[in-house]
Image (cartoon, rainbow, N blue to C red):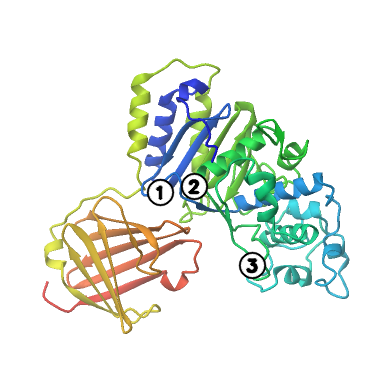
Amino acid sequence: MNPLQRVRPEETGIPPSAILRFIEDMAERNMNLHSYMLLRHGKVAAEGYFSPFQRDMRHPVFSVSKSFTSAAIGIAIGEGLLSLDDKVIRFFPDKHPEQVHPYTADMSIRHLLSMQTVHRKSTNKDAGDIVYEYLHTPPSYPPGNVFAYDTTGTHTLCAILQRVTGITVHEYLDSRLFQPLGMQEIEWETCPMGINQGGSGAYCTTEDMAKFGQLYLQDGVWNGIRILPEGWVQQSTSKAVDNSSAGILLEGRRGYGYQFWCGRHHSYCAFGAGGQLILVMPEQDAVFVSTANTMLNRDEHQGILDSVWTWIVPSMQESCERDDAHYLKMKQDLDLLKLHLPEGSSNSPAAREISGIIYTLEPNESGWNACSFHFHEECEMTLFKDTGSHTLSCPWNGWHVRPDLFFGMSSACGAVWVDEFTCLIHIQLLEQQQMFILTCRFSGRELVMQIKPCGAFRTSHLDIVLVGQALGPI
């Protein structure tokens, strides 16, 4: 649907060698990148998809959804449906308490947009009626004074817009923004009340994200048609509040706008947990987008941005000579991109003795009582419970798409021997933001297997270390 124009990077003033260095840096950082796209002067200068992730896959973008919600509120203000100073409680006479606390009564749409609400953090995101809980939660301080990241506040913005329009934010944006930009069919989760999860629930492609960023770079105009009200881009992406107290490290905590993070060199960013990024750089007339899963380390996403500012941005020029050698190398490297897997071997001297052995497991929270491994052309692992078994086969030093061990969902699976007695198995779900790292350490007759979940699922019961003893000879 109306794809962005693809050109050689030199045509946008970016040498291919800069793209190569960015790719190398991501590999050196062991960055778990899923995709990226770089636009300059409105054209795609480079893009990469780390197999088995593909160009047309929708990816969860988490809090990038907040920036979509901000756009919807801006459009509604432009249509005269809302104003920044509208008090939140006036939209919910059926939901607020009989005696409204003065702090809550004074809270406005502006406060929700800039994360300066009356709450120290998000209220109950799992409530059947999130807005009811939001308005009934005792406030901590007057609005407009403290920056506190609040996803339920963004959800309340979606509820407000749905109250005044009679349709969801998704439906509202579909004809006003998504379709005019030629974005693919966006998926957007809803709460039990039928309200879009405006703080975290959208799924879209990498190119959809890039188009959204380009719209903002063009001051809300697309193909000569104004999509966002005049002045909204400047207002919503400028610093509205100091965020030095933020628990998230993003671009040095340079301020927060209306559901956008302020960045260096007058840039701004839509940010979703785990490396979902739309970085808009007006001074460079450029947009950078990524999808990833960096949730193993809280602030690892910043490494992606640091690499963009270090290797790509300084190379940008008004004009750039063709560089066929580096361009061909860049194309080859981009075609061969695959998910990160630690360096290691596809075999081990210990594999022959371990293969086929069943290990009985000590009692554990997940209820597994045994496991076995078969090492041949692939790594095959089976976990046993009283109710049945689950088997995973994955290639050595590569990736195949298989159902995962724990949820049975489509996933990328790969294995590697990192030393003679340690086999590492990586599992990354493709349609949800979740991965598992299984570190299997064999020592004599003993197996110690650490399962490390990383992602958006509730997996505390799987964050365990299993200890087993071999039943047969080794």
User: Which residue position is annotated with label 3?
Assistant: 191
User: Which residue position is annotated with label 1?
Assistant: 53
Residue at (72, 45) in percent of width and height: 257
Dot 1 alpha-carbon crowd within 10 angstroms: few under 14, some 14 to 19, many 20 or more = many
User: Which residue position is annotated with label 2?
Assistant: 291
Q: Specify the quadrant of the image occupied by residue 120.
A: bottom right
Tally the marks. Answer: 3
Q: Quadrant of the C terminus?
A: bottom left
Callouts 1 and 2 close, C-beta under 8 Å: yes
Residue at (49, 51) in percent of width and height: 58
Callouts 3 and 1 close, C-beta under 8 Å: no
Q: Nearer the N terminus, badge 3 or badge 2?
A: 3
* 372 over 336 or under it: above or below: below
The type of residue carrying mark 3 is Cys
Q: CA distance from mark 3 to mark 1?
A: 28 Å
Residue at (18, 66) in percent of width and height: 374
Question: What label sits on residue 369 in the rendered view?
Answer: none
The type of residue carrying mark 2 is Thr
Dot 3 alpha-carbon crowd within 10 angstroms: few under 14, some 14 to 19, many 20 or more = some
Dot 2 alpha-carbon crowd within 10 angstroms: few under 14, some 14 to 19, many 20 or more = many
Q: Nearer the N terminus, badge 3 or badge 1?
A: 1
Q: Single out the mark in the foreground, 3 or 2.
A: 3
The type of residue carrying mark 1 is Phe
Q: Is residue 320 left or right of residue 357?
A: right
Q: Position of residue 105 (x, y in %)?
A: 87, 64
Q: Nearer the N terminus, badge 1 or badge 2?
A: 1
Residue at (31, 84) in percent of width and height: 386
The answer to whether one can see residue 244 in this image is no
Q: Position of residue 129 (x, y in %)?
A: 70, 72
